[in-house]
Amino acid sequence: MPIIKDLIIQPRSAFLVVQCPKCGTEKILFSHTTREIKCENCGEVLTKPTGGKAVIYGKIVRRLD
């Protein structure tokens, strides 16, 4: 009898804690965001949409699972 493995599909998107490169403030962002997101303190652009995974300009501190 063959062994059948169950495949568990994991999502490619996630919520991320991103640190602003200019002022160091942390913000929770979606990895596949569809709009430009700026830092609330200094106005620095943190993400830009690309139609898929967003370009993240800040440092990714951790992934929220």
Image: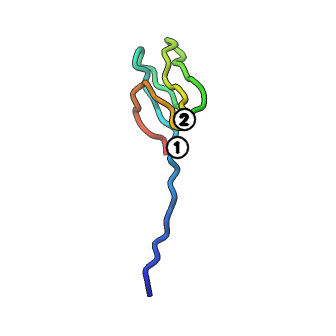
Which of these two is toward me, 60 or 12?
12
| N-term mark: 2 or 1 | 1
The residue shown at (43%, 24%) is 57
The residue shown at (47%, 29%) is 55
- Coordinates of residue 34 in the picture (x, y in percent): 60, 31
Question: Neighbour class for label 2 at 10 Å: few (<14), some, many (≥20)?
Answer: some
- Coordinates of residue 64 in the picture (x, y in percent): 48, 41
Q: Would you name the residue on which mark 1 appears?
A: 13
Q: Are marks 2 and 1 in contact (CB under 8 Å)?
A: yes
With respect to residue 10, does 28 lie above or below? above
Report the Cα–Cα distance between label 2 and label 1: 7 Å
* Label 1 secondary element: loop
The residue shown at (40%, 32%) is 61
With respect to residue 42, does 20 lie above or below? below
Disc 1 residue type?
Ser
The image quadrant of residue 30 is top right
Seen as rendered, the residue at the extreme bottom is: 1
The residue shown at (46%, 25%) is 26
Disc 2 residue type?
Phe
Q: Would you name the residue on which mark 2 appears?
A: 30
Which of these two is toward me, 51 or 17?
51
Residue 64 horizontal side relative to residue 36, left or right: left
* Label 2 secondary element: strand
Q: Quadrant of the N terminus?
A: bottom left
Which of these two is toward me, 18 or 2?
2
Residue 60 horizontal side relative to residue 39, left or right: left
Q: How many marks?
A: 2
Question: Neighbour class for label 1 at 10 Å: few (<14), some, many (≥20)?
Answer: few
- Coordinates of residue 7 in the picture (x, y in percent): 49, 65
Seen as rendered, the residue at the extreme top is: 42
In the picture, the disc for residue 54 is none
- Coordinates of residue 21 in the picture (x, y in percent): 40, 19
